[in-house]
């Protein structure tokens, strides 16, 4: 994922958060279990995405977990974490739009394009609100963007951030990215401006700050960043870590269920048509066999669909040439989202 990632930082950080560490005392490690669904963590500043996944995996005692798009340590906001079978739907979330609220500090450019980097250029010039607003149309729509030197882009098989850390000069080629919306929402003083951006996959917000600063005759870097939308997941879906931990404590004492924090696996598939099948057809699809579409009730669609049986997610499939071909089959045995979470806020 591009926009807000800062993968060069994560290997350098030492996790001092006991919540992500070993079991307390001499308590035995709890058995892992099958947990299926999405948790949209409101990630706190200072925590890496890898640490966040580890913490949630421990809280849910889950066998499998992964995130849908890195959020760097200095950023807060939406980090969708897939548990169990939801990991099969991660690409659909990563391909969705992202929305950010970010603050640019003017007058300094840094090698990482954010506040944690080394200052490389300075300027006494500060942009006016009018100059900033006049510039925004140039950064809206499909634009060419050079990714930051500290990014996960591969250069001859090596990550760009690894090469940059080793002191090598990294020259990355510009790439087309799409910015659907960009607006100036606040300018508390001459040194800082706050923006909101909605963009497609592969956009680097840090590069956006860098490039705006250069064109405005000053320099700029990100000094605050919050992600407010990832694919189908918005701010109403986010859960702070302390709330998750409190829910975990209540569940352990029998006063609630961690299922209340889960969103259904199929939430990630909001933009994909759903196709209901009979139990007989479901049995064939579950075995990996194609199902013929016939009769007047055959669906009039093609391409990727998600298949349900009796209201339950069964598979991702392709519809074409008169048949349903299963691509990914889901096995949702274990802890899943409670019925109340099946209705979006």
Image (cartoon, grey):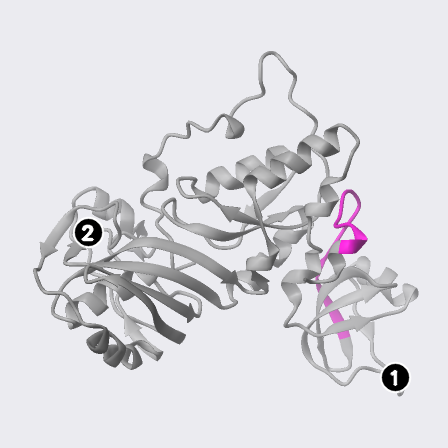
Residue that appears at 8% across and 60% down: 123
Q: Residue furthest bottom?
A: 296
Residue 61 visible in the picture: no
**Circle 2 sits on which residue?**
111
Image position of 305 (left or right of 53): right
Q: CA distance from mark 2 to mark 1?
A: 59 Å
Q: Residue furthest left?
A: 124
- Horizontal and vertical percent position of residue 340: 78, 55
Residue 267 visible in the picture: yes
- Horizontal and vertical percent position of residue 310: 88, 63
Q: Nearer the viewer, residue 176 or 327?
A: 176
* Quadrant in which the C terminus is drawn: bottom right
Q: How many marks?
A: 2
Q: Which residues are magenta?
A: 324-340
Tell whether label 1 touches label 2 (CB within 8 Å): no
Residue that appears at 41% across and 30% down: 15
**Circle 1 sits on which residue?**
297
Q: Quadrant of residue 35?
A: top right
Q: Quadrant of residue 329?
A: bottom right
């Amino acid at each position: 994922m591009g926009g807000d990632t800062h993968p060069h930082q994560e290997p350098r950080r030492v996790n001092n958060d006991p919540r992500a560490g070993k079991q307390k005392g001499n308590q035995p490690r709890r058995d892992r279990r099958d947990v299926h669904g999405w948790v949209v963590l409101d990630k706190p500043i200072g925590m890496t995405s890898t640490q966040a996944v580890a913490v949630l995996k421990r809280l849910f005692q889950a066998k499998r977990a992964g995130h849908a798009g890195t959020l760097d340590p200095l950023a807060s906001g939406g980090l969708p974490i897939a548990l169990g079978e939801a990991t099969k739907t991660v690409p659909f979330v990563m391909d969705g739009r992202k929305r950010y609220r970010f603050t640019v500090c003017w007058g300094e450019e840094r090698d990482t394009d954010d506040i944690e980097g080394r200052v490389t250029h300075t300027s006494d010039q500060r942009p006016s609100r009018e100059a900033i607003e006049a510039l925004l149309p140039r950064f809206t729509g499909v634009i060419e963007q050079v990714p930051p030197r500290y990014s996960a882009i591969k250069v001859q098989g090596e990550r760009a951030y690894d090469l940059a850390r080793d002191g090598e000069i990294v020259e990355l080629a510009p790439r087309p990215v799409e910015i659907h919306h960009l607006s100036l929402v606040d300018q508390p003083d001459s040194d800082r401006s706050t923006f909101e951006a909605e963009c497609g996959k592969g956009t680097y917000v840090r590069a956006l700050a860098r490039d705006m600063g250069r064109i405005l005759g000053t320099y700029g870097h990100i000094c605050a960043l919050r992600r407010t939308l990832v694919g189908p997941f918005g701010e109403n879906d986010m859960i702070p870590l302390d709330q998750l931990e409190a829910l975990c404590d209540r569940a352990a004492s029998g006063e609630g269920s961690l299922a209340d924090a889960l969103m259904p696996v199929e939430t990630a598939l909001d933009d994909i048509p759903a196709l209901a099948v009979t139990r007989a057809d479901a049995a064939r699809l579950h075995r990996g066999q194609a199902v013929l579409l016939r009769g007047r009730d055959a669906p009039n669609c093609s391409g990727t669909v998600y298949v349900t049986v009796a209201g339950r997610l069964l598979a991702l499939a392709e519809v074409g040439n008169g048949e349903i071909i299963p691509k990914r089959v889901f096995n949702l045995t274990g802890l899943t989202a409670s019925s109340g979470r099946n209705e979006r806020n």
